[in-house]
Amino acid sequence: MKITDIIARPHTLTVDPAIAIRSSLGHHRVSRYVLVTVQTDAGIEGYGEATVMPVWSGETQESATAAIRDILAPALTGHDARDVSAALATMDRVIHGNPFTKAAVEMALLDAVGKSTGAPVWQLLGGRRRDTGIWLKMSIGAFAPDDAARVALYAKSHGLRGCKVKVGTDVAADLDRVAAVRDAVGPDFRVGVDANGGWCEAECVAALRGLERLGVNMIEQPLPRGGAEFRACARIRQRTHIPLMLDESIFTKEEALEAIRQDACDIVSIYPGKNGGMLRSLQIALLADAAGLECVIGSNLEWDLASSAMAQVAVAIPNLSERVDHDIIGTLYHRQPVTDPPLRIAEGRAWVPEGPGLGLKL
Ligand SMILES: [Mg+2]
């Protein structure tokens, strides 16, 4: 099954303004992503999505479209679509970085392979380890306390059992926001925080007692990424029982290995876009599992195809966290689906689509 062409199409959707995310990385109002189609000589097409945001990985809609059109499609045309690992190696050879762009092509390849064999992608990743409904948590922007509480209640009314609140601005304002959410949802709802690297070590330490009092179940990415944060994160972990999760700090397996070596986290956030594909998310999950760490599925506000890819990984890894829920939530933020049927979210969970490949049609 030879690749005959790879087509990248820019596509733009607005985010529901009532819940659009504001964090220490900025305000996410519009999603300017890229849809990818891999065509094969077997007549089978595979679909993928490059969920690109410049503040996250340096990739843009224009850069991803050009990279696929000018570099990746010429390099991969003629390759066997079933040799997915070899395709990843080829992509690494012809362009550095660009994980979300490479993940989109890998997604489309695994979709095509699944369709050609009748297997859902999770079977290609080693098979299912749990049922196909993945528990979600809402991501609540760094809003004024009343607005944060409103979004938390929206999440609860949609059957979710948890949320994470964006912090990393000013510690006092951060704690007021988390307190308003806790007041609104009551003691049993799961509440975590995500600083997106917006704190320094002293600010995070200053927030710890307040976060403990508010029953926070996870602190995500307290310090800015770059490698120097691992030792500081290890020190923070000595001062609190709240599990610490790293997201922006861990894109690659090498970064995961270094975080493990330095005891920098309890939980590793993974997802195919950030990691450069589902196979690499799986690889990082297995590395984390060997070190006794759990994984949570993070998010860049994906559409349906990349959300399916996240759910396929979630059911296949051994160490999916049960104490912290997952961020397969992008489709809640975009009112228009890009697939028919859309990814199903019901009863607080994202459901892995049935059917071969990613199980969704463009
Ligand atoms: Mg995050």
Image (spheres, rainbow, N blue to C red):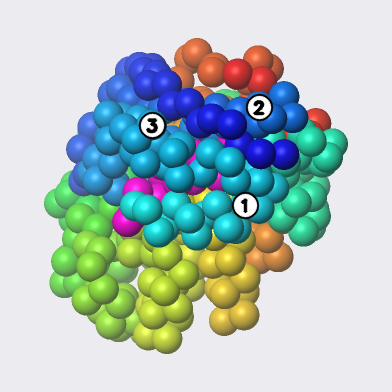
Residue 296 appears left or right of 360: left
Q: Where the C terminus falls, by quadrant?
A: top right
Q: Is residue 97 magenta?
A: yes
Left or right for 196, reference 149: left
Quadrant where the N terminus is found in the figure: top right
Q: Which of the two labelled residues, at mark 2 and mark 3, occupies the earlier sequence position?
A: 2
* Magenta-drawn stretch contains 305: no
Question: Which residue is disc 3 drawn over?
Answer: 69
Magenta part of the chain: 96-109
Residue 180 to residue 33: above or below: below
The answer to whether residue 169 is visible is yes
Q: Amino acid at mark 1?
A: Val
Residue 263 percent coordinates (x, y): 41, 83
Q: Residue at x 16, y 72 (%)?
A: 202
Which three-letter amino acid code belongs to the residue tagged 3? Arg
Query: Cα distance, mark 2 to mark 1?
Result: 15 Å
Classify mark 2: helix, strand or loop. strand
Question: What amino acid is at disc 2?
Answer: Glu
Mark 2 residue CB less than 8 A from any atom of ligand 1: no
Q: Earlier in the sequence, mark 2 or mark 1?
A: 2
Which residue bears the numbered disc 1? 84
**Horizontal side of residue 172 vs 3, given as left or right:** left
Give neighbour class at mark 2: few <14, some 14-19, many 20+ (Cα, 10 Å): many
Front in this rendered view, residue 80 or 203: 80
